[in-house]
Image (cartoon, rainbow, N blue to C red):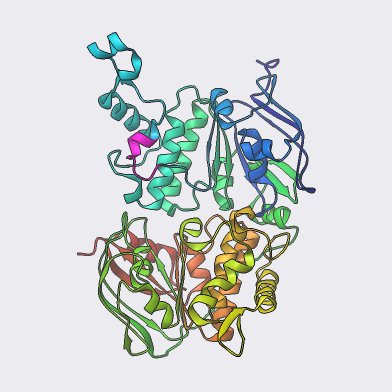
C-alpha cells in the first residue's frame, strides 16, 4: 500500500482574477477516506481553490490557473464540472443548485434516472423509455438514509425548509455510487445544531467507506470533531496544515485572521425595561417549509430580541410574515399603530426593515453595483440620495451622496471589494451579506428584522457583523429582532431569546440562561 499514489495532489496552484492574485502556490495532498477541514476568512481563496478542483467554467473563462491537479497519480484538467463528476468528484455548493419545481427524489437522481423499457421503446429506441419511479424512490431513500436524517423524497424543493434543501444536495452526491471525493462548501451554515450533528455522522460514514471529504465551514468546532487534518488559508496562501488533534479553535482563529478574535462574554447586556414597541398576536404565516400557526410575541423598545428554534418550526416564517413576503394573518401593532399584514410597502413606510436569510434571491440586485444595492431602497422608499433639478420639477440621483454612503458602509463593515462600483455578484458570500446589512442600515429604520445574518460567514467577519448590529442598536436606539440557527450567536448578542417550536413561542428567556434550558424549549412540544 505504501507505494500507492495519493487520491489527490494539488501542486503549486495559482490563480488571478483580472490581475488580482487570489491563490499563491497552494500545495495539498489527500488520501482515500481522509476528511480535511478547509478554513479561512471570506475572500481567503477557499471557494476559488474548490472551483479549480471541480472544473467550474468561471475558472476557464478567466484565463485558467497555474499548477497541477493530480488525481490518483494522473494529472487532470477539468474543463467543466461534468469532467469532475466523471472523475468521481462531487461538490455541494454554498448556494443551492436545485430545481425548485422538482421533488427531492427527482433532484437527487437528476440526469441519472433509472429507466424502464417498453414495447414502444424496444421498437423506436431508448428515447421512449419511461422513468422507473419505484427504483428512483429506492435509490433516493438509500442516499437519504446514508445521512441518517429524514427527508420527504416526494416534497417539492420550493416547499422545503432550507435545512432539508441542504440535505437534498448532499444526498444527490451520495447517490453517485463511484464517488471518491466530496467537497462540502458550508454545508452546516443553514443547519441547526441537531441537523449539523447528523451531517457530521454522515461525513464519518463516508470516510469509513473510503470517500475523501473536503469540509469547508466557519463552525470551527465541527472541523475539530470530524476532520483528520485542518488546512488554513489566509489571503490566498495555505498558512497551516496540521492534524486536527493537535490544535484548537482559538489557534485556528488566530491563523485564519492573523489576530485574536475573542467571544464577548455571554449575558453581559441588561435587557431594557422599556415599553412594548411591537406586539404580535395570533400570527399565522403560509410560508413553504415553515410552521407559523399562533405566534404571540412582544418586543421591547431598544432591545435586541433573538428568535431561535429548529429548522421548519417557524423562526424564519415570523419576519417573512410580518414584513408581507408571504401570506399571513393575525394582528401586529408597531408604536401603537396597526401594521397591515400582506403589505410590504406599508411596513417599509412605517420604518420597519428586513434583512432576509435569502441574500441572493431577495436581498441583492446581483448584477448591480454596491452603490445601487445600498442606496436604491432608501432612494425608492424615502426619496433619499435624490436632488431637485429644474427648480424641483424633477429629482435626479445624487451620485456624490450615493458614493459617500456606500464608502461609509464599505469601511464600517470592512466589505472586501475592488470599489463601490463593483457588482454584487462578484463578492464572496460573506461580503454579500454585509451589503444586505448596509442596505438596511442606510434606510435608518426604527425597527430591524435580521434573519440568519452570519450564514456562511467566517469567524472574523461574523464578529464584525454581530458587533455592527450591536453598535447600530446601541448608537441609534434601533430595536432589532435577530433570527438565527446558532444559539450561541444569539446568546452572544441578544438581551432575550424567544424559542419557536411547532409554530408557536415555546418560551422566552434572558440570553444569560444555559444552552440546556434553550435546548429543552426547542424540543418541547407546545400544543
Q: Quadrant of residue 177?
A: top left
Percent coordinates x, y for residue 422 in the rendering: 67, 60
From this view, report whether residue 194 is shown above or below residue 147: below
Identify the residue at horizontal 43%, vertical 86% (top origin).
301
Q: Nearer the viewer, residue 364 or 191?
A: 364
Quarter occupied by the N terminus: top right
Q: Quadrant of residue 372?
A: bottom right
Identify the residue at horizontal 56%, vertical 57% (top origin).
366
Residue ranking furthest to the top: 123
Q: Nearer the viewer, residue 395 or 31?
A: 395
Percent coordinates x, y for residue 497 in the rendering: 41, 72
Question: Can residue 100 be found in the magenta stretch?
Answer: yes
Q: Nearer the viewer, residue 452 or 434?
A: 434
Taking 166 as reference, is 228 left or right? right
Number of labelled discs? 0
Question: Can residue 305 be found in the magenta stretch?
Answer: no
Percent coordinates x, y for residue 371 in the rendering: 63, 68
Residue 198, can we see it?
A: no
From this view, report whether residue 478 is shown above or below residue 454: below
Quarter occupied by the C terminus: bottom left
Taking 338 as reference, is 490 left or right? right
Identify the residue at horizontal 44%, vertical 40% (top origin).
169
- Magenta-highlighted residues: 99-107
Residue ranking furthest to the left: 527
Q: Quadrant of residue 345?
A: bottom left
Amino acid at each position: 500500500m505504501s507505494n500507492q499514489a495519493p487520491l489527490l495532489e494539488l501542486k503549486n496552484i495559482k490563480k488571478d482574477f483580472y490581475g488580482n492574485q487570489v491563490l499563491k502556490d497552494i500545495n495539498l495532498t489527500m488520501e482515500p477516506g481522509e476528511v480535511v477541514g478547509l478554513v479561512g476568512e471570506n475572500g481567503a481563496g477557499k471557494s476559488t481553490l474548490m472551483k479549480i478542483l471541480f472544473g467550474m467554467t468561471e475558472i476557464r473563462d478567466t484565463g485558467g490557473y497555474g499548477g497541477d491537479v493530480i488525481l490518483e497519480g494522473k494529472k487532470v484538467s477539468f474543463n467543466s464540472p461534468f469532467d469532475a463528476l466523471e472523475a468521481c468528484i462531487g461538490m455541494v455548493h454554498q448556494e443551492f443548485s436545485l430545481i425548485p419545481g422538482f421533488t427531492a427524489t427527482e433532484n437527487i437522481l437528476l440526469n441519472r434516472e433509472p429507466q424502464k423499457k417498453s414495447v414502444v421503446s424496444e421498437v423506436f429506441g431508448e428515447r421512449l423509455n419511461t422513468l422507473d419511479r419505484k427504483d428512483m424512490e429506492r435509490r433516493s431513500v438509500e442516499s437519504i438514509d446514508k445521512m441518517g436524517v429524514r427527508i420527504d423524497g416526494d416534497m417539492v424543493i420550493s416547499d422545503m425548509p432550507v435545512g432539508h434543501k441542504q440535505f437534498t444536495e448532499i444526498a444527490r452526491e451520495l447517490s453517485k455510487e463511484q464517488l471518491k471525493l466530496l467537497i462540502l462548501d458550508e454545508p452546516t451554515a443553514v443547519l441547526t445544531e441537531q441537523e449539523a450533528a447528523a451531517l457530521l455522522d454522515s461525513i464519518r460514514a463516508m470516510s469509513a467507506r473510503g470517500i475523501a471529504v473536503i469540509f469547508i465551514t466557519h463552525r470551527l468546532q465541527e472541523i475539530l470533531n470530524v476532520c483528520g487534518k485542518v488546512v488554513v488559508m489566509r489571503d490566498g496562501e495555505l498558512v497551516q496544515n496540521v492534524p486536527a488533534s493537535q490544535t484548537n479553535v482559538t489557534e485556528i482563529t488566530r491563523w485564519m485572521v492573523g489576530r485574536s478574535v475573542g467571544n464577548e462574554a455571554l449575558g453581559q447586556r441588561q435587557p431594557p425595561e422599556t415599553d412594548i414597541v411591537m406586539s404580535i398576536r395570533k400570527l399565522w404565516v403560509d410560508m413553504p417549509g415553515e410552521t407559523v400557526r399562533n405566534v404571540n410575541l412582544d418586543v421591547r423598545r431598544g432591545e435586541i430580541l433573538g428568535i431561535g428554534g429548529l429548522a421548519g418550526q417557524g423562526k424564519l416564517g415570523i419576519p417573512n410574515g410580518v414584513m408581507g413576503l408571504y401570506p399571513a394573518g393575525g394582528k401586529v401593532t408597531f408604536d401603537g399603530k396597526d401594521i397591515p399584514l400582506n403589505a410590504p410597502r406599508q411596513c417599509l413606510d412605517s420604518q420597519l426593515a428586513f434583512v432576509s436569510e435569502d441574500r441572493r434571491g431577495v436581498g441583492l440586485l446581483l448584477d448591480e453595483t454596491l452603490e445601487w444595492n445600498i442606496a436604491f431602497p432608501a432612494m425608492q422608499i424615502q426619496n433619499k440620495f435624490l436632488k431637485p433639478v429644474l427648480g424641483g420639477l424633477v429629482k435626479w440621483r445624487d451620485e456624490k451622496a450615493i458614493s459617500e454612503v456606500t464608502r461609509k458602509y464599505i469601511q464600517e463593515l470592512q466589505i472586501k471589494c475592488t470599489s463601490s462600483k463593483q457588482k454584487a455578484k462578484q463578492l464572496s458570500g460573506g461580503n454579500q451579506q454585509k451589503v444586505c446589512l448596509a442596505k438596511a442600515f442606510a434606510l435608518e429604520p426604527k425597527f430591524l428584522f435580521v434573519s440568519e445574518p452570519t450564514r456562511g460567514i467566517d469567524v472574523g467577519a461574523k464578529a464584525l457583523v454581530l458587533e455592527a448590529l450591536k453598535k447600530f442598536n446601541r448608537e441609534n436606539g434601533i430595536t432589532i429582532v435577530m433570527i438565527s440557527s446558532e444559539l450561541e450567536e444569539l446568546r452572544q448578542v441578544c438581551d432575550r431569546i424567544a424559542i419557536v417550536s411547532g409554530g408557536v413561542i415555546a418560551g422566552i428567556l434572558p440570553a444569560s440562561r444555559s444552552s440546556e434550558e434553550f435546548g429543552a424549549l426547542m424540543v418541547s412540544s407546545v400544543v
